[in-house]
Amino acid sequence: MSAPNKSYDPVEVEALKPEAIERMRDEALAAFAAADSLDALQEAKVAHSGGTSPLALANREIGALPPHAKAEAGKRVGMARGAVNKALTARQAELEAERDARMLVEEAVDVTLPYDRVPAGARHPLTTMMERVADVFVSMGYEIAEGPEVEAEWFNFDALNFTPDHPARQMQDTFFVQGPKGSDGDGESGVVLRTHTSPVQARSLLDREPPVYVVCPGRVFRTDELDATHTPVFHQIELLAVDEGLTMADLKGTMDHMVQSLFGPEMTTRLRPNYFPFTEPSAEMDMLCYVCKGESVGNPDRPCRTCSSEGWIELGGCGMVNPRVLIACGVDPEKYSGFAFGFGIERMLMFRHNVEDMRDMVEGDVRFTRPFGMEI
Ligand code: PHE
C-alpha cells in the first residue's frame, strides 16, 4: 500500500480524478438501470458497488493521500458511492415490485374454474359393518363362504327342510326368477332371489368335509315395500359350525364372544325358543342392550331409546342344525352336530348408530354415509 506522501496530488491519482469517479458512478447507474431482473441487478451490484468495484478500489486509494487532499477526494468518492447505493436500492425496490405484480398475475387461482377433483370415496357403512362382524369369526378360525344371489329354490328351501307348502315360499315373500317348483309340470327346482343366507349352509356342507366352520355374509331379497323398517334388498350374515360333539352351549359361547367383540366385554346374549325348519331346537337370539345394559328395565327414571327399555335387543335366529339338513347335505347326523346363526346387518347398523329410517341406507346420499368416516 502506498504511504502518505506530502507531494501527492489527488488530481494526479488516475482513479480519483473527478472525471474517473463520475464515469464510475455513471457506469454503475447505467448498469442498474439496464438490469432487467433481480439476478441481473445482483450481478451489477457485485460489479459496481461490491468490495472489488472500481469505486471501492478508488476509495482505498484515499488512505494513501496526504491529509490535506483526503477530504476533497473522500467527499467526491463518498457522494458517488452514495448515489450508487441509492440507485441500487431504488432499482431493487422497482424490480421486486415488478416481480410481485407478475406473480400475482401468473400465480393467481381462479376459484370460479370448474372443479375436477373427485373426493376420495369410502365404503358404505353396511359393507364395513359386515366385514367387522365377519372378522370376528375369521379371527376364531372361520372361513368366509359365499353363494349366489340368484339361487336354486332347492338350496334356498328344500335342502333347508322347508316343506313344499311352507308359507315363506309364497309369492308374497319370495322373488321368483323361474316358476315355483313343479309349476311348469316338469318337477324341476325353481330359481329365486335368495331370501336368506342359509342356502350357503347347504352349499358349504356339500363342498366340504366336516369339520366345517364358515361365515357367510351376503345380500338377500324379500318382496317387502321399502319403508322406514323394511327394504326388499338387505344383508345378512350366516354362521355355520359342524363338528363332532357341538352343543347349544358352543352356540351360546360363540354368540357371546361375538357381541363382546363388537359391543364390549360386559355384553351377553340370551336365547328364546323359536321355530325354523332348518334348526332343531331353534331360538331367537337377543343381546343385552349395549346402551343401558338392562338398567332401564322397570326403571322409569332411566328410559332407554335403543331397546325401548326392554333391556334386550333382538339380533337374529339360531339353533342346532336340523339332522334332516345334515342328511340332505351328505353329513352323518350320528357323528356330527352343528349350530347355525343368522342375522340382518341393516338392523344392527340401525341400533348401533341410531339410524331411524332404513331408506337412508339405500338412497346413496353422502350426507348419510359421511359421518361414518372414510374407512376403506
Ligand atoms: N335364515 C334365518 C332368517 O333369515 C335366520 C337363521 C339362520 C335362523 C340360521 C337359524 C339359523 O330368518
Image (spheres, helix red, strand yellow):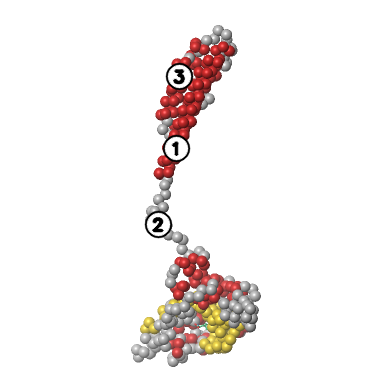
Q: Quadrant of residue 365?
A: bottom left
- Whether residue 28 is visible to the viewer of this picture, yes or no, is yes
Ligand 1 within 8 Å, label 2 CB = no
Task: Depth check: give the residue in front, 215 or 267.
Answer: 267
Left or right of residue 171: residue 277: right
Q: Position of residue 82 (x, y in %)?
A: 50, 24
Which label belongs to residue 97? Answer: 1
Q: Are marks 3 and 2 in contact (CB under 8 Å)?
A: no
Q: CA distance from mark 3 to mark 1?
A: 29 Å
Q: Which residue is label 3 attached to?
A: 22
Disc nearer the start of the sequence (2/1): 1
Residue at position x 59%, y 84% in the image:
271
Q: Position of residue 154 (x, y in %)?
A: 44, 85
Disc nearer the start of the sequence (3/1): 3
Q: Which residue is label 2 attached to?
A: 116
User: The N terminus appears in which quarter of the rendering?
Assistant: top right
Up-down relation of residue 265 to residue 374 (above or below): below
Identified by mark 1, the residue type is Ala
Q: Are marks 2 and 1 in contact (CB under 8 Å)?
A: no
- Whether residue 203 is visible to the viewer of this picture, yes or no, is no
